[in-house]
Amino acid sequence: NAGVTQTPKFQVLKTGQSMTLQCAQDMNHNSMYWYRQDPGMGLRLIYYSASEGTTDKGEVPNGYNVSRLNKREFSLRLESAAPSQTSVYFCASTQTRSGEQFFGPGTRLTVL
Amino acid sequence: GNSVTQMEGPVTLSEEAFLTINCTYTATGYPSLFWYVQYPGEGLQLLLKATKADDKGSNKGFEATYRKETTSFHLEKGSVQVSDSAVYFCALSKGANTGFQKLVFGTGTRLLVSP
């Protein structure tokens, strides 16, 4: 039981490049989330998927897209990276009723 | 809207000192409340939670009591260790029995414990 896994752990991009961050969970959770963490700002929700087949915008969705590939996997795509997207990105999943979220180890992204 | 306010850090303590990290919230209805901890280089882990007023969550020597009258959920530990050095996040979740829900996080408080 690996919990929530994310790839890659680190990534450096140039402005304008695209990339996809991968996330998978093996806990049979219905809901999955993408957050970004910036100094002094805590975690901010980018997108979430309440259940397989649905996705919705969170607090800071601009510049991102997501895909809920199946129940296990939820990917985050940056189509044209900008320096303002330099951040640490966390994926999480939740047992629907408890609200308790389980987090992956994070991806540290730098956009030059 | 829903929001969480935490005390600014860093909080710097000596080993075996008493810890309090303040957290207050704004929400309609009856949210569930959580404390998450983030150790260096890792993701967040649930530390403790409380789902209704006057509930006390506890884990690893940490405690927090859900105080509806003061809309607070302060984190306490009687004797901190160097290994407790981490960033602590207070969070709330609305509608514990309605199925899907989102967490709202505070900005985090860094705790530094010296030997």
Image (spheres, coloured by chain):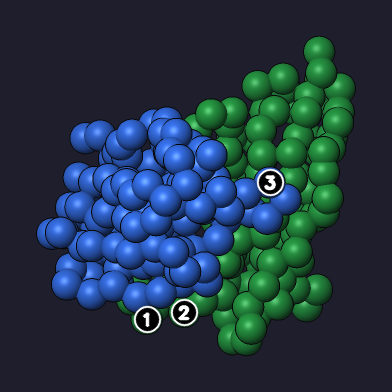
Residue drawn at x 20%, y 52% as measured from the top left: A73
Placement of B1 over or under B77, stated as above or below: below
Residue drawn at x 58%, y 80% as measured from the top left: B30
Percent x, y of residue A26: 20, 45
Q: Mark 1 or 3, which is nearer the eye? A: 3
Q: Secondary structure at mark 3?
A: loop
Q: Which residue is mark 3?
A: A39
Placement of A69 over or under B28, stated as above or below: above
Q: CA distance from mark 2 to mark 3?
A: 29 Å
**Parent chain of label 1:** B
The foreground one among A95 and A83 is A83
Q: CA distance from mark 1 to mark 3?
A: 32 Å
**Which lettered chain is shown in green?**
B
In the picture, which quadrant includes the C terminus of chain B? top right
Percent x, y of residue B100: 35, 74
Percent x, y of residue B89: 64, 50
Q: Is residue A76 visible?
A: no
Amino acid type assigned to the residue bearing label 2 in the image: Gly
> Dot 1 surroundings within 10 Å: few (below 14), some, or many (20 or more)?
few
**Parent chain of label 2:** B
Q: Colour of chain A?
A: blue
Tell whether label 2 touches label 1 (CB within 8 Å): yes
Q: CA distance from mark 1 to mark 2?
A: 5 Å
Q: Is residue B28 visible?
A: yes
Q: Which residue is mark 2?
A: B95
Q: Residue furthest top?
A: B115
- Which of the 4 image quadrants contains residue B101? bottom left
Q: Secondary structure at mark 2?
A: loop
